[in-house]
Amino acid sequence: MPKLTSKRQVTIPKDICNKLGLLPGDTLKVFERDGVAHLVKMSSETLSGTLACSKVTESESAANHDDLDFKEVLKEKAARKFRGQE
């Protein structure tokens, strides 16, 4: 069973990675809901179509312009929607 390291890292078992199609370098969004940690693979395949019609407001774009690129804003928006915050 994987253990959390002192750097708060954990190894995802190979069979789980294979089942989910996780590869080294993939971006994962980690969040908590109802006391359970969730990992969501954030990739163009995951987001394609889902966000095709999504609109990022001017305030979201302006607020995140210096810190995040457009893809990051869309990822955050998708994660909030998944968590039921939008």
Image: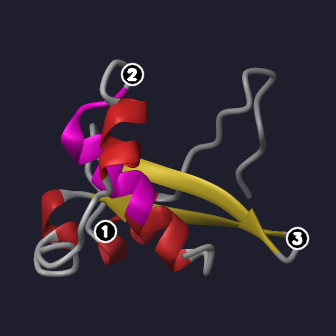
- Where is mark 3, residue-wise? 35
Disc on res. 38 = none
Mark 1 element type = helix
Q: Nearer the viewer, residue 36 or 23?
A: 36
Magenta stretch prevailing secondary structure: helix
Range shown magenta: 68-77
At label 1, which amino acid type do we have? Answer: Asn
- Where is mark 1, residue-wise? 18
Please state if 66 lies on the left or on the right of 34 as rendered. Answer: left
Q: Which residue is depicted at the point 24% across and 67% down? A: 55
Q: Which residue is depicted at the point 26% across and 51% down? A: 23
Residue at the front extreme, as displayed: 58
Q: In this rendering, is residue 24 above or below 84?
A: above
Q: In this rendering, is residue 11 above or below 47?
A: above
Mark 3 element type = loop
Q: In this rendering, is residue 33 above or below 2?
A: below
- Where is mark 2, residue-wise? 67
Q: Quadrant of residue 24?
A: top left
Q: Nearer the viewer, residue 65 or 32?
A: 65
Q: Which residue is depicted at the point 12% across and 72% down? A: 48
At label 3, which amino acid type do we have? Answer: Gly
Asked whether residue 4 is drawn in magenta, I would say no
- Which percent across, then down, holds residue 75? 35, 55
